[in-house]
């Protein structure tokens, strides 16, 4: 039975304890192949998470920019309609 409790994962530094590799190496080529598959999967997850975080950051910036544009547009519309209303009232008198 494989003992994965020897795997030490730090949030900022991902590393595989050599004991895990030694344990898997006892199973020969298949054990080393399993370790390489695990490591490849781990690296892919890490890269995916980075891309996912980048996409989320870009979307957040885009949403903030759109919100600012909408607020600016609404403010300009309100000012324009207030000016138009003022002119109409002024023309009536």
Image: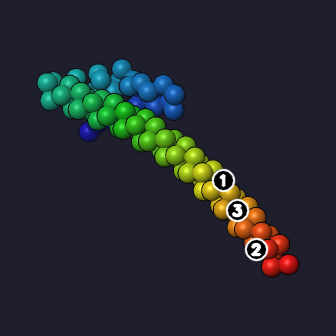
In this orientation, does residue 82 appear? no
Label 1 CA crowd tier, 10 Å (few <14, some 14–19, many 20+) = few
Q: Are marks 3 and 1 in contact (CB under 8 Å)?
A: no
SS state under label 3: helix
SS state under label 1: helix
12 sits left or right of 41 in the view: right
Residue 6 screen position, x and y as percent: 40, 31
Q: Name the residue furthest left.
A: 29
Label 3 CA crowd tier, 10 Å (few <14, some 14–19, many 20+) = few
Choose top left, top right, bottom left or bottom right for residue 70: bottom right
In this orientation, does residue 46 appear? yes
78 sits left or right of 26 in the view: right
18 sits left or right of 71 in the view: left
The total of numbered circles placed on residues is 3
Using the numbered discs, state the Cα–Cα distance from disc 3 to disc 2 in whole angstroms.
12 Å
- Closest to the observer, 43 or 61: 61
Using the numbered discs, state the Cα–Cα distance from disc 2 to disc 1 in whole angstroms.
24 Å
53 sits left or right of 38 in the view: right
SS state under label 2: helix
For residue 72, the mark is 1
Residue 80, placed above or below residue 22 = below
The colour style of the image is rainbow
Q: Residue at x 49, y 46 (%)?
A: 59
- Residue that badge 2 annotates: 88
Indicate which label's residue lies in the foreground, 3 or 2. 2
- Residue that badge 3 annotates: 80
Indicate which label's residue lies in the foreground, 2 or 1. 2
């Amino acid at each position: 039975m494989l003992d994965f409790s020897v795997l030490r994962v730090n949030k900022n530094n991902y590393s595989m304890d050599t004991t895990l590799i030694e344990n898997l190496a006892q199973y020969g080529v298949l054990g080393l192949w399993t370790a390489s598959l695990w490591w490849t999967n781990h690296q892919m997850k890490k890269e995916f998470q980075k891309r996912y975080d980048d996409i989320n950051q870009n979307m957040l910036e885009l949403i903030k920019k759109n919100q600012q544009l909408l607020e600016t547009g609404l403010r300009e519309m309100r000012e324009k309609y207030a000016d138009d209303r003022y002119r109409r009232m002024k023309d009536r008198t």
